[in-house]
Image (tube, rainbow, N blue to C red):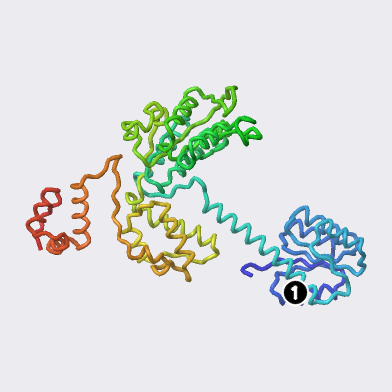
Amino acid sequence: MSQKIRLLIVDDEKIALKNLSHILKKEGYEITTTASGQNALKWVQERNFDVVLTDLRMEKVDGMKILRKCKEISPDTEVIMITGYATVETAIQAMQHGAYHYIAKPFKLDEVRNVVKEASEKIRLKKENVALKERLENIEEKVRIITEDPQMIRLLDMAREIAPTDCNTLITGESGTGKELMARYIHLHSRRAKGPLLAVNCGAFTEDLLANELFGHEQGAFTGATVLKKGLIEIASQGTLFLDEISEMSPSMQVKLLRVIQSREFHRIGGTRSILVNVRFIAATNRDLKELIESGEFRHDLFYRLNVVTLHQPPLAERKGDIPLLAYHFLKKYSVLMGKETTEISEEVLNFLRSYNFPGNVRELENIIERGVALSRGSTLTMSSLPDDLKGLCLKTYRRKEGKFPSLEDQEKTYIRWVLDEVGGNKSKAAKILGIDRVSLWRKLKKFDLEDNESLH
């Protein structure tokens, strides 16, 4: 045991007290003894004991009083009763008051040893579960956004500023950047924090199913509607409704949602009564809604209703300084969940993660670390713990920037810069890798403003 179990032994027979103390001290318990029930009653009020082993029949204060006081002050303390006057009635009474076990005299020392060991194991497991829960609660903070990136810090500052204003908000960004986490962050910093936060993925349902999810239905509204069902909009009243992948919502559903936002009322499917609601809407998308408006796939009036404030979540590739922070956060989380003692990440792994472009963003990083912890065998996460299909990967992803596709020229410039970085600025090597001569490389460097004062190697 990492921490000794604290054991109080109470018996007015000094020989029995001495024998019990002697045998249990050998087992490694932290022992306190007394031959007085009055002293025991006082001590259980002043000190914390994990297990109390007490005689039942004692003058002035008997074991039953000690049992009741223990359960009143410290319900988790396990109490074991010993008596030379064992009857079924007293055994039942002791158990009804919360005794862990009942031992009759004359007892065998092995029997006492085993019962105390079992009670101690129960205590140890309780303590481990409490400690694990506390650690997980610290790790699983639902609105903890881990960052040191200046862009993200500015974004969080803006999120805290708009949170109390109750305005509708649009969160944009690639899949896996944490848009729902940002929505939770806004909700829990708002005046609606005590209300519900409900989330629905608009791309996960057909139009009819999404309507049923959002608006609910009256009993008998359609075949199978045997009971009334409240929709998410109604349930989220006084709180926040997070509409993920809003761009996937059909045009007719967009009209219905727009009406709710404008009028703050709706009808359940099959209903005629208007239901008033007080809901804050936060929407999210990984697509460019302005492009969808131009193509007629998204209503401009709904866009302006949702887009009171826009928060753009940057991809992980644009906040690489956060990669070690996030990696260690996930390492701690999954080490606890899996019961592993993996506490470090090798420098080789960190360098690899920094060089990787994470097309799946933070979600992909979390999956990589989770798999790594599952496969790790020591205290340090090494390259051998990473998935085989990832180790040989050197991926450069092509992302939209501010909603626009990069041009071929932009990509050429980025690629030339990357090659130069990889070869340490050696332009002869860079030209060879690029398949061009040194003069052509020089012209491209001048064109893209990548020149320096050094001559070609």
Foreground residue, 10 or 166? Answer: 166
The single residue placed furthest to the left in the displayed view is 439
Place residue 37 in its image quadrant. Answer: bottom right
- Looking at the figure, which quarter contains the N terminus? bottom right
Q: Which residue is drawn at 44% across and 57% down?
A: 367
Residue 317 screen position, x and y as percent: 33, 51
Residue 167 lies, in percent from the top left, at 45, 29
Horizontally, residue 102 falls left or right of residue 381, namely right
184 and 137: which is toward the camera: 184
Left or right: 328 in relation to 72: left
Give x and y (percent) for residue 235. Answer: 58, 34
Circle 1 is placed at which residue position? Answer: 24
Name the element at disc 1: helix
Task: Check the picture and name the quadrant holding the C terminus.
Answer: bottom left
Vertical position of residue 31 compared to residue 253: above or below: below
Q: In this view, does 302 lie above or below 439?
A: above
The structure residue drawn at horizontal position 78% and vertical position 57%, both measured from the top left corner, is: 70
Q: What residue type is labelled 1?
A: Leu
Q: Identify which residue, 86 or 179, lies in the foreground.
A: 179
**415 up-or-down from 312: above or below:** below
At 45% across and 27% down in the image, what residue appears? 255
Q: Does residue 342 appear to the left or right of 123 in the view shown? A: left
Residue depicted at x 46% and y 57%: 330
Q: In this view, does 214 lie above or below 429?
A: above
Q: How crowded is mark 1: few (under 14 residues within 10 Å), some or many (20 or more)?
A: some
The x and y percentages for residue 142 are 51, 47
User: In terms of image quadrants, where is residue 95?
Assistant: bottom right
Depth check, front residue: 288 or 113: 288
